[in-house]
C-alpha cells in the first residue's frame, strides 16, 4: 500500500510540477504528516525531489527527471475500459481509486506536449449523465453485483417486481453485464441452472406446456416518475414482452438474458459457485436490442389530438422524443386558428391522461372517445376542487 502511494506521489510531481504538501495530501487522501514522511522516503531512495519554502513553495522534481515506473496493474488496466463513465459511477462500482491511479500513470507516461493537451481536455469537458431535477440512484447492492460480474459468480437476489402489486420474488442469476442509463443502473443476467448429469432433467423444470414457475422479473424502468428524466420515461411494467406473453427478441432469446433494475434488489447473496459466460454475448448489442424492443412494445394505442401553436412547441417537453416525432410527422395543415390535428402513440388511457393534461388548454383529444371522456371527467373534478 505504501509503495503504491510513494509511486503516486512521484507521478503527481512528475505530471503536475510543483505541489504543496497539503495538495498532495488531498489528492492521496492522507495526512500532511504522511506526505512529509513519503517525500523523505523518496529522497532517501535517490529520487531528486526538493522543497521550496514560502507562500509559493512546495515539492517538485529536479528539472528533466522522469520515472519509467508507470506500469499498470491488472485492475488499473481493466478500469480504463470504464474511463468514459462519470467518476462517481466508477466509485460505485468499486473502481474509483484504481481508475484514478491508472489515469495518473498514463498522464505521467505522456510526453509534456501530450500531457498538456490531455489535461486541457479534462479541464474543459465534463460529463454529467443524469437528467435534470432527478437524483442519481445509488443502489445498495451495486458494488456486490459488480463484483459478481467481474468474477463470474452466481448470485441469489430478492427482487421487487414492477407493477401495482410490486411483490418480491427470488432469482438465482448469472450476471453478465451492467448498464448505466440516465443515472439508473441495470443488470443483464440469465437464470442460473445447476449443471446436471447427462440424461437427467432438472427437478425444478416445468412440465412441457406448463407455465414457467420462474417468470423473468421485469427490469424495465420504474414507473415511479421520481427516478426518470422525462415524463415519457415513466414506463409501464405491463409493456414488457414477458407481461404480455410475447416471446423474447431473437438476440436475447439465444442467450436467455433478462434485464433487472439494480435498485429493486432488496437482498443479495453471492455464491462461491462460478459460471461460464455466454461466449458471444455482446452487452452493447444486447442493450440496444432490449431498448429498441422496449420502445416498440411500449405504445399500445393511438390518439387523435388537436394542438395549438404553443402546444406544438411543448410536444418535446411533455411527450418525449418518440411521441413528439410521431406527432410532427402525422400533423396536418393548421386550421384558421392555427391549431393542428395529428395522431400520437399512447401507452394507455391513464398514462395518456397524465401526459396530455400537462398541455392545459393547448391540446384537445378527439379520439378515442374513452380518452376524451376521461380527460373531461378529470377536468371537471379539478374544477370542483377549486370551486
Image (cartoon, rainbow, N blue to C red):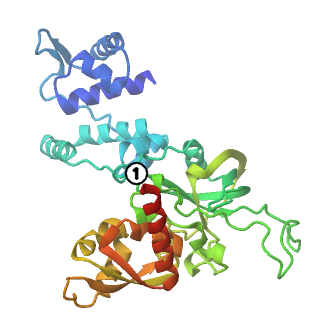
Q: Quadrant of residue 331?
A: bottom left
Which quarter of the image is occupied by the C terminus?
bottom left
**Disc 1 packing (10 Å; few <14; some 14–19; many ≥20):** some
Instruction: Answer with the quarter of the image where residue 172 lies.
Output: bottom right
Judged from the image, the secondary structure of the residue bearing numbered disc 1 is helix
Q: In the orientation shown, which residue stands out farthest toward the front? A: 387
Side of 226 where 42 appears, left or right: left
Residue 121 is left or right of residue 382, and the answer is: left
- In the rendered image, which residue does mark 1 sit on? 82
Q: Residue at x 25, y 16 (%)?
A: 21
Q: Position of residue 257 (x, y in %)?
A: 61, 68
Answer above or below: position of 270 versus 364.
above
Can I make out residue 192 in this image? yes
Q: Is residue 342 above or below residue 241?
A: below
Residue 296, visible in the rendered structure? no
Question: Residue at left 85%, top 71%?
Answer: 198
The residue drawn where x is 11% and y is 12% is: 55
Q: Position of residue 277 (x, y in %)?
A: 61, 62
**Observer-nearest of 218 and 312:** 312
Tell me residue 154's x, y (percent).
69, 53
Along the line of sight, the residue nearer the viewer: 160 or 129? 160
Number of on-image labels: 1
Q: Which residue sits at x=52%, y=56%?
A: 224
Give residue 292's position: percent from left, percent from top.
46, 75
Amino acid at each position: 500500500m505504501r509503495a503504491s502511494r510513494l509511486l503516486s506521489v512521484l507521478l503527481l510531481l512528475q505530471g503536475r510540477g510543483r505541489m504543496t504538501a497539503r495538495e498532495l495530501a488531498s489528492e492521496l487522501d492522507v495526512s500532511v504528516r504522511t506526505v512529509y514522511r513519503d517525500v523523505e522516503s523518496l529522497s532517501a531512495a535517490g529520487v531528486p525531489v526538493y522543497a521550496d519554502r514560502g507562500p509559493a513553495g512546495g515539492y517538485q522534481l529536479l528539472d528533466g527527471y522522469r520515472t519509467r515506473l508507470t506500469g499498470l496493474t491488472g485492475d488499473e488496466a481493466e478500469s480504463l475500459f470504464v474511463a468514459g463513465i462519470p467518476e462517481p459511477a466508477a466509485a460505485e462500482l468499486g473502481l474509483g481509486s484504481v481508475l484514478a491511479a491508472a489515469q495518473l500513470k498514463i498522464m505521467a507516461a505522456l510526453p509534456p506536449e501530450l500531457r498538456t493537451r490531455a489535461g486541457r481536455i479534462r479541464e474543459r469537458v465534463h460529463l454529467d449523465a443524469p437528467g435534470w431535477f432527478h437524483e442519481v440512484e445509488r443502489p445498495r447492492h451495486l458494488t456486490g453485483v459488480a463484483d459478481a460480474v467481474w468474477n463470474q459468480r452466481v448470485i441469489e437476489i430478492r427482487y421487487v417486481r414492477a407493477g401495482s402489486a410490486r411483490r418480491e420474488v427470488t432469482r438465482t442469476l448469472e450476471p453478465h453485464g451492467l448498464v448505466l442509463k440516465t443515472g439508473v443502473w441495470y443488470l443483464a443476467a440469465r437464470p442460473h441452472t445447476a449443471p446436471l448429469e447427462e440424461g437427467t432433467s432438472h427437478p425444478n423444470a416445468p412440465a412441457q406446456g406448463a407455465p414457467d414457475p420462474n417468470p423473468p422479473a421485469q427490469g424495465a424502468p420504474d414507473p415511479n416518475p421520481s427516478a426518470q428524466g422525462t415524463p415519457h420515461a415513466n414506463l409501464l411494467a405491463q409493456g414488457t414482452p414477458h407481461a404480455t406473453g410475447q416471446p423474447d427478441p431473437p438476440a436475447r432469446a439465444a442467450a436467455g438474458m433478462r434485464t433487472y433494475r439494480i435498485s429493486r434488489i432488496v437482498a443479495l447473496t453471492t455464491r462461491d459457485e462460478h459460471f461460464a459466460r455466454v461466449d458471444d454475448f455482446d452487452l452493447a448489442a444486447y442493450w440496444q436490442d432490449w431498448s429498441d424492443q422496449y420502445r416498440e412494445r411500449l405504445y399500445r394505442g393511438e390518439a387523435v389530438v388537436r394542438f395549438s401553436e404553443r402546444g406544438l412547441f411543448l410536444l418535446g417537453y411533455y411527450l418525449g422524443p418518440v411521441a413528439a416525432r410521431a406527432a410532427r410527422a402525422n400533423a396536418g395543415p393548421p386550421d384558421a386558428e392555427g391549431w393542428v390535428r395529428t395522431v400520437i402513440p399512447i401507452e394507455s388511457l391513464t398514462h395518456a391522461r397524465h401526459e396530455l393534461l400537462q398541455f392545459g388548454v393547448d391540446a384537445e383529444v378527439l379520439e378515442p372517445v374513452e380518452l376524451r371522456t376521461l380527460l373531461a371527467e378529470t377536468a371537471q373534478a379539478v374544477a370542483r376542487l377549486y370551486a
